[in-house]
Amino acid sequence: MIDLEERLTRIHNPDVRPLAQDAYRSYTTGIPRAAIVLTWTAVCADVIAKVQALNDDGEPDARALAEKVEEAQTLAGDSDEKTRRSGVAKMLEVEREILDTALKLELIDSSQHVQLDRLREDRHQSAHPSLRPLGELYQPTSEYARAHLVAALDALLIHPPSQGRKVRESFAAAVAAPGFVLHPAHLTHTYFDRVRPAARKHVVEFAAKFAVLQLDAADTGLPADQLADRMANCLGCFAERDTALVEQAMAKQMTKLGNAVPAVQLAAVGRLGDLPAFWKAVPESLRGLFESQIEQIGSKGERAAASLSGAEIKVLGLVTHPELRQAMTALEKAFAGLHYSHRADVISRRPDAYYTQHLADLLTAVRSFDDGEFVAKMAVLPCAAFLDLATLKTILRAWWDNIECWGKRMPGYLETLYQATAHLGPERDVVWRAYLEESRDYERTYRDLARRLSLPEPPASAAAPS
């Protein structure tokens, strides 16, 4: 009961809402015959309004019915009784073809056409009970009247005057627009929650095709990879509403993805690897291919001079997902074997708590001032919010052990690291104070740092750590 009342509040056309509410009141007060008649009246009024709206938007298939409705309304308003009767006859003609027009305009699908056509037949029997054979009165049940009202609401009344094709075209234009901004609530409301299931499916499949295959879209003026990234973000929003639908849409593209060039395959993994629906759609044979490609990236990234593409870095960034590390063992091995500069590059794209275990190794591995600065900016500082006290101690020790690669630059980065570890509470100062007390050459380098951190200065004769 409550669910039906909620549907009534979602009726798109405010002029149609009172008709549907009257049908609901008739149902709740035990007058199912009246409920069926009023439900059909609401359907007719809703379709006519939507046809007129589409005709105003220039939809050619809406023109014929819109003109008939306008002609009927003109005739019905004439002062001559005969003319008025011809207007009523014209409106009955509109009523006979109204569902066919709605189907042609994609306002309903074929299954919904059958449901609403049965409503029309039951409306006739409710309004003209003598139509039944042997003079029996038509006596619909309350449950039957409710089923008709639910069908009308779900198929038609709660949806705006949008067609499946038009919805998809609008979605494509919006995503490819230069000023596109992903707002999940607006996206799902406009192209998922407020459209018919058939149109919703078309939108999701359209997004999946471009996101998975990175198709060229020269007519949009947007590079294929950029459009694919936007479509992938949209799929992520849609998956929050219906994971199974997104999975099915991507599964349809897997054969083509298997035949695509390696660059497109890797781009798809990096772009969609965060979505569980993507991995559910990927067949085992393709999953094995991806793992082999990850192994190759790892071998390539062992060399400092190697250049990793953005797609390759995104793929290795999937190492933060525990389930993927377990399912694809090559992923963690490839990341761990990267040159420290490449690992820092991967970390910088999306900092995560997983990377904190690698930070000390990165600090120890650097061999120059520039590389040290790169690792600090790209890896250590971005992950500072994920540190615990034990890891902070390890990082500070590694920083000290490789002091020759930091020199006088170190206090500035350490100050930033100190500020970024405020989440550790008072114990943070204990760790930092111990670090400063053990540091060599305190007078020259660390007294300034202690002042910056507002920590008490230890004796000037502090010993270097053993």
Image: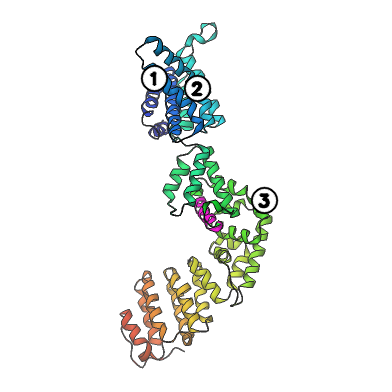
Tell me the magenta residue range.
224-236
- Residue 418 in view: yes
Chief secondary structure of the magenta span?
Answer: helix
Q: Residues at badges 3 and 2 in contact (C-beta under 8 Å)? A: no
Frontmost residue, 22 versus 140: 22
Q: Is residue 229 magenta?
A: yes
Q: Which amino acid does label 2 sit on?
A: Leu
Mark 2 element type? helix
Q: Is residue 62 magenta?
A: no
Q: Quick one: quadrant of the N terminus?
A: top left
Could you say where residue 99 lies in the image, as x and y percent from the top left?
51, 25
Could you say where residue 412 lies in the image, as x and y percent from the top left?
38, 80
The residue indicated by pointer 3 is: 255
The residue indicated by pointer 2 is: 119
- Tell me how far mark 1 sits from mark 3, CA to CA: 57 Å
Q: Which amino acid does label 1 sit on?
A: Thr
The residue indicated by pointer 1 is: 74
Label 3 or label 2, whichever comes before in sequence order: 2
